[in-house]
Image: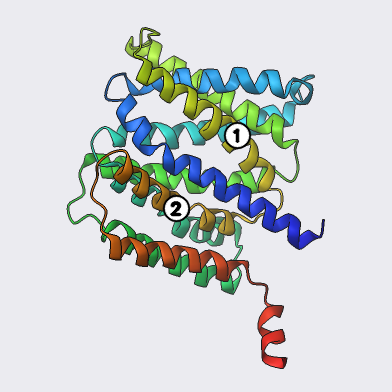
Amino acid sequence: MSSRTHQLTMDFLLLLVTFFWGATFTIVKSAISEVDVFAFLTLRFAVAFGIMVILFHKKIWPIHAPTLRAGILLGIFLFAAFAFQTCGLTMTTATNSAFITGLNVVMVPILLLIFMRRAPAPLAVVGVLLASCGLYFLIGGVPSQWNQGDLLVFVCAVWVAVHIILTGYYAPKLDTLALATWQVGTMAAISLGFSLWSGTLTIDLSSLVWRAIGITAVFATVFAFAVQTHAQRFTPPTRTALIFTGEPLFGALTAHWYGGEPLLLEQHLIGGGLIFLGMVIAEIRPGFWKRVYLS
């Protein structure tokens, strides 16, 4: 497999991760209407961690201290992102949550430039700008009056951006499956602490909530974070964030089809098209333009 084909494969897998995350917005919103947020997160991440320990036990034993430390750090930021997003979902729409979370695509290159002095590639900047415009059209503009839920989801977007950057830093240096496992285990432990502190932990749940836990644990956690951590060995943080802008598109479509939220066909087509165009442009290598000019 050529390096270009391998990179495209990693990007496709990241897009598939994005699909699972976007498709579960409505599922999570329905579940947390019946159960406390931290109880839900505890069970989701505990189930996911158990699966990962079984699948990747040869990767995590014996424990490699630097991988464990990095996994704990990533888990802390990832827990913060999930906690703020899930709490925000109790007070805002799944569509708004998807849009605001998608703003991390703008935050990643800005944070990289400020803290790591790394400027994104020019075509990546163009892709980010197009995707940002696509987000605007997709959701029907920035919410005119932000409520508390919207603000909580905005904080989530900041932590998502930090997590993407840190994953891009650690993934090329450490075993990615062990790294993903320890970060999910950290999220399970922190969630358990919060749910015990609030006295909300329970396993007496409806079948709807258990289905949501199973779906999010397997597809949106085990698969998603194993793939993301591995793919970021090869995919720069800015491009990763750009691919993740597909999450609001999948979130908006799912919220419409299964959650009954309104879908405005024209603006969603424009928004989704701009996001897709941004991804395509970011994938084009600089030499492409020279070849086109000389052909």
Q: Between tags 2 and 1, which lies in front?
A: 1
The disc, 2 or 1, on the residue closer to the chain's N-terminal end is: 2
Quarter location, residue 201: top left
To which quarter of the image does residue 183 belong?
top right
- Vertical order, 293 against 61 (above or below): below
Give the residue at mark 2: 104
Which quadrant would the C terminus be assigned to in this image? Answer: bottom right
Looking at the rendered structure, which numbered label has been put on residue 145?
none
Rendered location of residue 70, percent (x, y):
65, 34
The residue shown at (30%, 56%) is 139
Q: Which class describes the residues within 10 Å of circle 2: few (<14), some (14-19), or many (20+)?
A: many
The picture places residue 252, in percent across and down from the top left corner, at 34, 49
The residue at which mark 1 appears reads as 223
The residue most toward the bottom is 294
Circle 2 sits in a helix, a strand or a loop, which is it? helix
Image spot of residue 117 (x, y percent): 60, 62
Residue at the limit of the structure toward the left, as seen here: 145
- Front-most of 286 and 279? 279
- The type of residue carrying mark 1 is Phe
Amino acid type of disc 2?
A: Asn
User: Residue, x 47% and y 40% (percent of image)?
Assistant: 21
Kindly indicate whether the residue at mark 1 contacts the one at mark 2 (C-beta within 8 angstroms): no
